[in-house]
Image (cartoon, grey):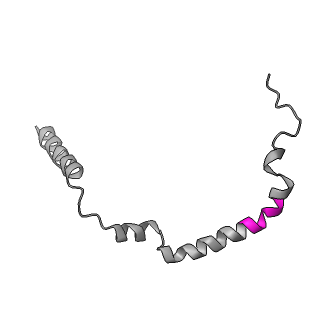
Amino acid sequence: MGRGRAKAKQVKVARQLKYNSGGTDLDRLRDELGVGDSSSSDDADDLNDELADRYADYADDYGAGDDDDGRSSGRR
């Protein structure tokens, strides 16, 4: 007898989630996810530049055209 009442409540909650999409606080969500504002993109650009500088000499040694070095992969 109790299962019908529980199922009805689940259906009610599911309908509310499906049809009531309003009320999302995007600023709060951004804070919870730890996503910074556009002003912090300068820090990300600095980090990307630092990583690019660090691995630039590897890119020179192992360029894009050097993927096939003449060794067979063992497949036929």
> Which residue is pictured at 73% across the width and 65% down the height?
52
Query: Magenta: predominant secondary structure element?
Result: helix
Relative vertical location of residue 23 with respect to residue 17 in this rendering, above or below: below
Q: Nearer the viewer, residue 42 or 20?
A: 42
In the picture, which quadrant includes the C terminus? top right
Q: Residue at x 71, y 66 (%)?
A: 51
Name, please, the residue furthest toward the right: 70
Residue 55 x, y percent position in the rendering: 78, 62
The question of residue 41 being in magenta is answered with no
User: Which range is magenta?
Assistant: 52-58
Estimate the x, y position of residue 66 in percent, counting from the top left.
84, 45
State how many labels appear: 0
Residue 50 figure quarter = bottom right
Q: In the image shown, does 49 or 18 lie closer to the viewer?
A: 49
Identify whether 27 is placed above or below 72. Answer: below
75 w.r.t. 58: above or below: above
Question: Looking at the figure, which quarter contains the N terminus?
Answer: top left
Looking at the image, is 43 positioned above or below residue 5?
Answer: below
